[in-house]
Image (cartoon, rainbow, N blue to C red):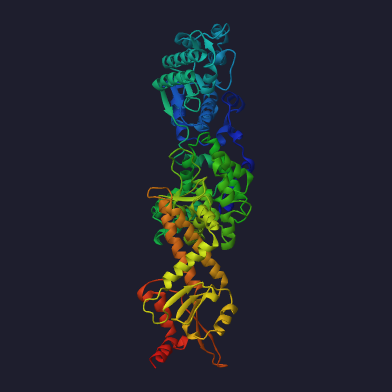
Amino acid sequence: MLQTVKQACKFNPVISDYRMSQGVENLSDLITDEGDGREFFSRNFVTKGMEQLFKEGMLRLSGKSDQAVFELTQAMGGGKTHMMIALGLLAKHPHIRPEVLPEELNNRLNFSNARIAAFNGRNTPDNYIWGDIATQLGAAEAIKEHWVNGPKAVDQKKWMDIIGDIPTLIMIDELPPYLDNASTQVYGTGTLANIIVYSLSNLMAAALELPNCCIVIANLSGSYGNTTKALSDAVSNLQQETRRQSMTITPVQLSGNEIYDILKKRLIDVMPSDSVISEIAEAYAQQIKKAEDGGYIVASSIEQISEQIRETYPFHPSFKHLVALFKENEGFRQTRGLMQFTARLLKSVDERKTDDVFLIGTQYLNLNDDQVKDEIDRISPKLIPAVTRDIADKGNAIAETLDDELETDAAQQVMTLLLASSLSRAVGGRIGLSQSEIIEFLAAPNRNPDEFLTVIDKLREQAWYLHREDQRYFIKETENLSRQIERNAKDIPQPKIDSALSNRLTGILQPHSKNVYLDVNVLPRMSELNLRGSRVLIVIKPDGKVPSDELNNFFEFQQEKNNLLVLTGQDSLMADAVEDRLRELYAIEQISRNLKSGDTLYEEARDRREEAESRFNKALSGAYNTILFPGIDEIDGAERFLKVTIDNGLRIGTGDQSAEKQIEDLMASPRANYKLAADLKDELC
């Protein structure tokens, strides 16, 4: 029996109230506070970027590498500080190196503990950045002349004298805010930022000459880059100097599987055996294969799918693809932010009433949870109205009411998945999923693709913020075509609907052979009917009673009863549905008239018009399915209306498939007492 995620894994309790601030790390404090580093490494996954920095950095401190400067590149919250702390702990505590580093690398290291200086640009020490670094290296007096009477730049020789041949690790983090503040302080013909850039450039130049000196600096790009011209110039100059001398390292490859390993290490305490994971991987692969065989999707091979799930378990392979769509949002902290987002997702799965989750995907986010909703608000605040109206509002959202009707959760899964795919705020960024991708990402044991296809169709009709463009579905902050249709449909005056219905029925019933009737009168006033001329087919709106009292009274006092044929129905609710569908169709036609080829909604409006036409015709065919014709009651011999039902509904076509031909055949059949044949015989006689 397949084990669910909750049965197979144990989540870290931190998921219940994870805060991004828990992942905020201060470089200098943590190197001091982390003890010997064992606890730090026990809860952290060593990425490829870390391995690269550990190797090159530790070899440099041993005098066995020519690479002195390293630049860590990633957006904020991307693991740069974390990586610096890890290297600092290894440089400081030789006894933990065998537990973290490969044996071959550890055997090449020839130093015990290195001197460490760590500078955080969020601080503004009185002795400036150079004084703070030198003081941490034990050279407070040597650097004093460069700050005590005001800032004085430090040249390359001074740095070389301070650092010497002792293994020395210098780490600089959060430099842009420090330069931002320094660019406002004028000294001579420049600013403090100019002095900082010059002194740090000399520090890097000195490091190249000192075989045991290693400098690690966080990347300088970010939101401070264009604040002022002075800051922009300072950052640009320092970037050029850094890139000229440094090796660039990315802490975490968010596009690969490393992010899964980090999330598992931090947020999941117990993982199942490989055999349990393999069983789940095979089950999912079979589900996706069934969907492909059924023509729902085009997927990878079973082997590839199984392998992907083994690598990403307990997360669905789609998770990283969806995250990649919004990780570049301005202000999103790529590792810490993702950690919090995932903690909210795990909390949603953990608190889910039904234990039916075998792989964790974004479709399981509980958007009725305030923390989860706040997370969406933080990533893409403009979509909150869409969440409340369409997806989750304590049972009142469109997807929730639809799921209640269908006794499923398919609508909420579809809409929540699409929400996750629509969180990108990048201009021109890709958002949304195709129908095939939706089915592939939601395929799971005990689920059928048809249930998702059904709700997609219904959501297209009912949701306000669900859009489709270039075959992709997505959530947007603006109301969609469905909402415009809904609003316009309500505003159409009843006389226009009556007129439109009359015109359509007149067109459908227009006589050509004229064997059974010669004229059509749709929704007539009884007082205006005249049966003294040709035989007429009148159409009466169904009101639940067949025939109606008004029609019976009219018929009773007519001399030419045989000139009357009535098309009606037996269900007033079905008649109301015809009006609703006609309102929808009328509204789409109004909207379409204002669109032209190339407009965003043009193709969707065209498709919706075809669908609305089909729904209207289906409703009309089902509602108007009864013929009333004059006849003799076999019981009392009285002349009254007799009733016959049109099998399979009223035809809407031409020629042999026309409504007239269908009524003609019906009236000539024994079900209508051969009414048409008898009438013709009487006329011949």
The total number of labels drawn is 0
Using residue 508 as the reference point, say whether residue 371 is left or right of it: right
- Percent across and percent down for residue 92 are 54, 23
- Percent across and percent down for residue 624 are 50, 74
The C terminus sits in image quarter: bottom left
Q: Which is nearer the eye, 366 or 602?
A: 602
- Percent across and percent down for residue 452 are 49, 58
Q: Which is nearer the eye, 66 or 29?
A: 29
Q: Is residue 351 above or below residue 174?
A: below
Q: Is residue 88 visible?
A: yes
Q: Is residue 68 above or below residue 436?
A: above
Q: Residue furthest left?
A: 655
Q: Is residue 342 above or below residue 276?
A: above
Q: Is residue 114 visible?
A: no
Using residue 652 as the reference point, say whether residue 398 is left or right of it: right
- Percent across and percent down for residue 340 are 57, 39
The N terminus sits in image quarter: bottom right
